[in-house]
Amino acid sequence: MIFMDFLFAFIIGGLICAIGQVLMDVGKMTPGKTLSIMVVAGSIISGLGWYQPLIDLAGAGATIPITSFGHSLTQGAIAEAQKHGWVGVLTGMFEVTSSGISSAIVFGFIAALLFKSKGKVN
Amino acid sequence: MVIVFGQKPSIIASAAVAGPLERKSVFYSYFDSVVEDERWNQATNEQGNVKMIQEACQILLNKTGLNRLDIDFFLAGDLVNQMTPTNFAAREIAASFIGLFSACATSVSSVIVACLLTELGASQYAIAGASSHHNAIERQFRYPIYYGSQKPATAQWTVTAAGFTLIGKHNPKNPSIVAATVGKVIDYGQKDPFHMGAAMAPAAYDTISRHLEKRKQQIKDYDLIMTGDLGKIGLQILKKMFAETGATREECNIFRDAGAEFYGEDPSFLAGASGSGCSASVYFSYVLQQLKSGRFKRVLLVATGSLHSPLTFQQGESIPCTAHAIEVTME
């Protein structure tokens, strides 16, 4: 049922974002702190083995929020650690996430070449 | 400390310029110039801030027919690190220059220093004022604008505007500064930089109440007591503080705030405007024109400033604030 996929993506994705909004509005967290907490939380939940079921259920609802970056860090570290021992924790962390980090740099660079930042106009 | 100026230095002319978004301001029609490009056609926002200051000062000179060499002192400040926009603008203005940092209270602290130099006989003409540039200040104090960071409803919107005045010897045709109160630094332990109205209101209360006490005046003696950028919430706190010490509702209505009114009721500007250009552009356009037209006879301009930096906030320190006041009259 494709409709159920959409529904769970909406609910889980919305729930993760709502937690972030509560951290900012009620917890008075800065955007930087909120971001870090979400990444660390995603990483810990992933280590406990709970994040993958969330992705299976909600798809993009769980992979798009920043918590999924924490999940990728943990999974990369675990996978490499199984192959190469403790040193794999260090080499593995950015193995899965490297494409995300590199594309942030590459697309950021392209956007900076093509566009000029502007303030609010209306 | 309340200073009484025996020679009543006058505000000979004033100029206010603003950025493109400030077309939305309720004070728009009082500004001398509103630029189309938010960077004033410069490469960076900071260079735009420099141009904005230079343009305001040039308008000031054009209004009076004076040459820049006639200016004895240039006293001004802004909110960028080391106040480079003002420092860089000063190299064009070529007058003796003192950069002043009272954060958003610089509009008034610069006028106080100009009045002191005029009383001393050291200055015939002094330019005083302040400016702020939204994009440059957001980068300085919070996040670069393209980061698109959210702000809570208590936060305020830094204006892109500059206001400058020419202070000279007493002239009964112009508004004159009869007294001033230099603010103390007040800190009630408020730590939230997105709620600065609450941090600054006690400083405004302290300066206003001391000014009235030392001058043996009442709130009613003024047509207007206008704070700088307390914003909508900060103004309510200030009114409440005065109401609790016996001010009537009618007296509380004499209090207004440039930041609270600046963008009208538009909710996208949150709790109102802020920035050193906020009080400067409103005081030195709207308020002075109302004095000249005779609608106001005596006003108290109380510019408020919060004296924190991004670093002190990150280190968990509270926000010390100040407020400086000038009493301006029209004969």
Image (cartoon, coloured by chain):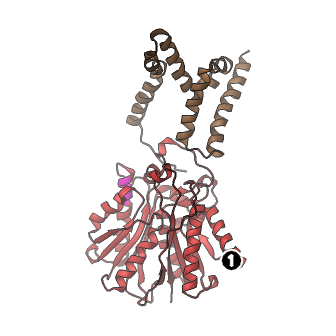
The amino acid on which the numbered mark 1 sits, given as a three-letter code, is Thr
Tag 1, which chain? Answer: B
- Is B315 on the left or on the right of B93, as rendered? right
Residue B273 rendering spot, x and y as whole percentages: 55, 60
Furthest residue in direction front, as rendered: A86
Location of residue B295 (image quadrant): bottom right
**Residue at 56 percent of width and 71 percent of height:** B204
Q: Is residue B271 above or below residue B7?
A: above
- Is B170 on the left or on the right of A11, as rendered? left
Task: Tell me, yes or no, if residue B21 can be seen here.
Answer: yes
Task: Tell me, yes or no, if residue B262 can be seen here.
Answer: no
Furthest residue in direction top, as rendered: A83
Chain letter for brown, please: A
Chain letter for red, please: B
Q: Secondary structure at mark 1?
A: loop
Q: Is residue A18 above or below residue A101?
A: below
- Is B304 on the left or on the right of B118, as rendered? right
The answer to if B18 sits in the magenta stretch is no
How many numbered circles are shown?
Answer: 1
Location of residue A48 (image quadrant): top right
**Residue at 59 percent of width and 87 percent of height:** B217
**Range covered by the magenta-colored residues:** B46-51
